[in-house]
Image (cartoon, rainbow, N blue to C red):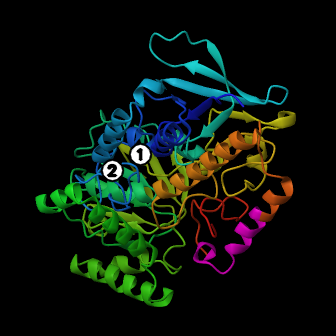
Amino acid sequence: MSTPTIAIIGGGFSGLYAAIKVKKELGIQAQIFEASDDIGGAWYHNTYPNCGCDVPSHLYSLSTDLNPDWSQLYATREEIHSYMQNVAKKHELYKQTRLQAKVIKAAWLEGQRRWQLDILDCSDNGSKELETAYFDFIFLCVGSIRVPLIPEHFKTFTGPVVHTAFWDNTVDFTGKRVAVIGNGASAVQVIPALAPIVSQMYSYQRSVTWCTLRRQYSYSSLAKFIFRWIPMVALIYRLYLFLKVCTAQRGGAKRFKKNLEVEMRTRMEKQGRPDLIPKLIPEFAPGCKRLAISDNYIEALCRRNVVVQTNTIKKIQGRTIVTQDDDEQDFDILVLATGFNVAGFLGHLEVHGKTEANLNHTWRQNFPDMYKSTLINGYPNMFMILGPSSYPGNNSAVAMGECQVDFAVGLIKRMAKDKIAAIEPSKQAQDKHAAKLKSGFDQTVWKGGCTSWYMNKQGDVSNTRSVI
């Protein structure tokens, strides 16, 4: 078997790690295709105020490139993106990356045992004509948190509409009446940033969420010095953070829920807003939805210029939002913190396998069956990284992406050794793994009676893992 060619679609964390691992373990310089004008994925696109990570920074980083200089326990978006740029420069990944190159179709050619990619040059001076390239293996590192979810009825709002995934920094919120839709991670971060500068804010929340204190702190110069010159300390600290996150509820779910309820109640009472307690404290167990982490989200909702509206939105008329209780409010600006279309995360990328099977269509209609959340029957030599059934519910997605890449690189090594041209899981093995995943969620918190991005329209948990 000659040296295989490898394409990596996506320049986020998993794409960078895949390129590093392929180069180090296989001696192959993979071709990275990134549709944007810089690497970084979500950390390049998300520029909304107060954007940051809810996983500790020393854990939310590549194992190949520990960063002793993280400034805080939880890093900001700017610091994370800068870290990713530095990693790309260190490993000379920019040299093997085509920026503003959008892969719009990947098709398996069974007769040739390779993938055909159709690529659109999106640069200002690009040809705008499709290019074709061929590769033996492809890593799909586009991630499932990338295509903004914009509910249809919000498109009728006649004023400025800003989605947190593609923030418009030219919009001035000062002194404006603003509606924020949603209460996920981006809402938890953007609301405290906007609340002090707007005249009035309405926070529309379809369902409430558990929120715990972030307890943010900065690392001292001494700590950074130790992390840099005694790397073993950084590794041990990283492991400590991993175990701490994993065992956050070890004292028991009921006890954890009770403690969290007391914490949230105390925060609202300190702000003189006990009236918000019935509205903001959920009845479902913590973890059913991703736990919000913030030192100032609850406090922002308690401000006198902020109204928490939990009634369902009935309609949009011009700049007016009408809820089911017939409350009508006019707004200058609408902020959509409505998350992502995780079911349609492939977006513009059409993926065709053997017998011209269309992955986009299959997954729109059915549960995204996979083998070890990485391989798909009917799609040989394709590795899905951080796609369905791969995101950890309470830990670092970067670590999970690394596990998937390591698994894929190990397979390529074995294929080279045994002179195997193509590999895919059998339908039987894939079905068995998918059944194990589904059954693993029974009696878990993810099926605890809430609605969340972990679940698809059929009620299956398809965006996190129950087993490894």
Look at label 2 and name its amino acid.
Answer: Cys
- The residue at the point 73 percent across, 56 percent down is 371
Residues shaded magenta: 433-448
Q: Residue furthest front?
A: 417
Tell me if mark 1 has few (under 14), some (14-19) or many (20+) residues whose alpha carbon lies within 10 angstroms of its own: many
**Mark 2 or 1: the one toward you:** 2
Three-letter amino acid code of the residue under disc 1: Thr
- x, y (%) of residue 205? 46, 63
Q: Secondary structure at mark 1?
A: loop
- Taking the magenta stretch, the answer to whether it contains residue 436 is yes
Name which of mark 2 and mark 1 comes first in the sequence. Answer: 2
**Is residue 124 toward the left or the right of residue 342 in the image?**
left
Residue at image point 64% right, 29% down: 3
Decide which of 218, 407 is in the foreground and name it: 407
Identify the element where label 2 is drawn: loop
21 on left or right of 216: right
Q: Dividing the picture into quarters, in which one does residue 2 lie? A: top right
Q: Read off the residue under disc 1.
A: 164
Residue at figure coordinates x 46%, y 74% from the top left? 246
- Residue receiving disc 2: 51
